[in-house]
Amino acid sequence: MIQNLLDGVLTGSFLSLGAIGLTLVMHILRFANFSHAELLSIGAYAALVFDRLFEALLPVFAAAFAPLTLTGALVLALLVSMVATGASAVLIDILVFRRIRENGRELSMVFASFGMALVVRNLIGLVFGLHSQLYSPDIAFATVLSFDPLILVKPDQLFVFVAALAIMAVLHLVLTRTTFGFALRAVAENPALAQANGVNLRAMITAVWLIAGALAAAAGVFYGLSHQITPVMGRDLVLPIFAATIVGGIGSVNGALLGGFIVGIATNLSLVILPAGYTPAVPFLMILAVLLVRPNGLFGEARE
Amino acid sequence: MSDPTAPEAILEAHGVTAGYVRDLPVLHDVSVRVARQRVTVLIGPNGAGKSTLIKAVAGQVTVFAGTVTHEGTDLTRLRPDRLAAHGIAIVPQTDNVFRNLTVRQNLALASRGTGAAARLAAVFDRSPVLADKRHTKAGALSGGQRQVLAVAMALAKAPRLILMDEPSAGLSPKAAAEVLAMVRRLTAEGVSILLVEQNVKLALQMADHVYILAEGRNQVDGPAAALRGDRIVADIYLGGKRIAAA
């Protein structure tokens, strides 16, 4: 059970990153973006491409930071992938969502996001194949934290946990200490008043997509480090990420952070009593429970 | 009835037709002139188009015809986020502060740009109540304090013109009088004011010039001193009571 708890915390770290990006988009752009999890796939595959490229161009970065399987090339690839995925999110907005948004069709945006998810997922499958891939062919041996009860953790998982927390801390500082962060929160709360205070709405929307894309890329790479990269990883993660967002409360970054860990832990703990095949239903049940008992989630506020 | 002896205009709206839907304008050919360092007040019944005129000037409502000029620059169809760059600030009637931001964060956002720190410090010097509550979320302030914060956010931009939509709405009579007295004092600091006010008595007491709108059209305008004793205005808006000057 302690092993499940630990796995849940580690799962929560990349779910939180995905949920933070989704909650920002849902709060500021006011639509449920069902293609958000596909940004994790874009990020994971972009990092795979850049990782191979940097390993070929800069062999000095190909060595792993033992005991991690992580290489310098992958760290560089992660950073480039965050930018590229952010840019992809902006591009998708320009091509699809902005046009629908300017016609004021909120529900159409939700349907468009379903379509966008299918397009991205299938494009990735077409380009990279349907088989799963790994960043590193090296086998990462788990470290034994305890023999009784047996508790194992991979160094890569610890890296993912620490790196995710660091990214969240940086985002928290940006949102609470900088005028850019105030502007972002202001747009989320009252776009008209934000504009009256000199905030460029279109620039802020672009910034939100860049941030959401970058966080999704980090989440995708972290998922790939602790699991495998597949074209359907977005499909597998969309429900847990939505659950984390709804549990935390739409619009709350702190809520999304906590929601990610709650969903991660609950899903992994459910393995104690449920067969593994039923665990994908756990986030769905959590969404239902939260919407019934506390519709605004843990930290969300009612809005018109 | 425009006063030819009034100081130069800082803002002129001329023949403005504006609204939310093209085929259904709220304002019809409305003209307003705001004199520099004066308080110009818009009054009129509900639905007269007073707030819509403020929003049209601020670029928040589409102007279908007519012009808006500020200090000689055409601002018709101005992008709302460019308002502050032209030295104009707006204080909306409701939802005029960011409830989830602290007092300091609200003011920091409003005072962005060159000399922000000095302007922020000046606002806190001017409003001790805001200085004391700088780390309090705006949503936790009283109605009067929120209104003071909203005005302070406008002042933090060092504007030459402030557009205010019913700053006394929802306040106690005492708080409303205090807010309007503060507005009146701003003109001495070089700020010009265009203000919507439902309380006709207060408006006529504190204004320099008053425009009366009804059904989206100009009805009457003139110096407040003249309208205070006007029998028709008194009959329509004050239940027949004429009022004394402030």
Image (tube, coloured by chain):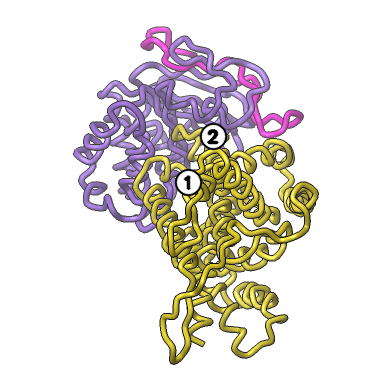
Q: Quadrant of the C terminus of chain B?
A: top left
Position in image of residue A253 (x %, y %): 48, 58
Q: Position of residue B240 (x, y in %)?
A: 47, 37
Question: Disc count in the image?
Answer: 2
Circle 1 sits in a helix, a strand or a loop, which is it? helix
Tell me whether circle 1 and circle 2 mark residues in contact (CB < 8 Å): no
Residue appearing at x 53%, y 77% in the figure: A265
* Vertical relation: A272 (above or below) B151: below
Please say whether residue B105 is one of the residues in the magenta stretch: no
For this orientation, the residue located farthest to the top is B4
Asked which quadrant contains residue A134, the reply is bottom right
Task: Tell whether position B11 is magenta.
Answer: yes
Please state if B181 lies on the left or on the right of A192 as rendered. left
Q: What element carries label 2?
A: helix
**Towards the viewer: B18 or A195:** A195
B13 or A167: nearer the eye? A167
The three-letter amino acid code for the residue at tag 1 is Phe
Residue under numbered circle 1:
A61
- Give the yellow chain's letter: A
* Residue B94 horizontal side relative to residue B150, left or right: right
Q: Give the range drawn in magenta.
A: B1-30
Disc 2 target residue: A203
Identify the mark nearer the N-term, 1 or 2: 1
Q: Residues within 10 Å of mark 2 (few under 14, many from 20)?
A: few
- Mark 1, mark 2: which one is toward the viewer? 1
Whole-number angstrom distance, CA of label 1 to CA of label 2: 36 Å
To the question of a shared chain for discs 1 and 2, the answer is yes
Query: Percent x, y for residue A240?
Result: 63, 68
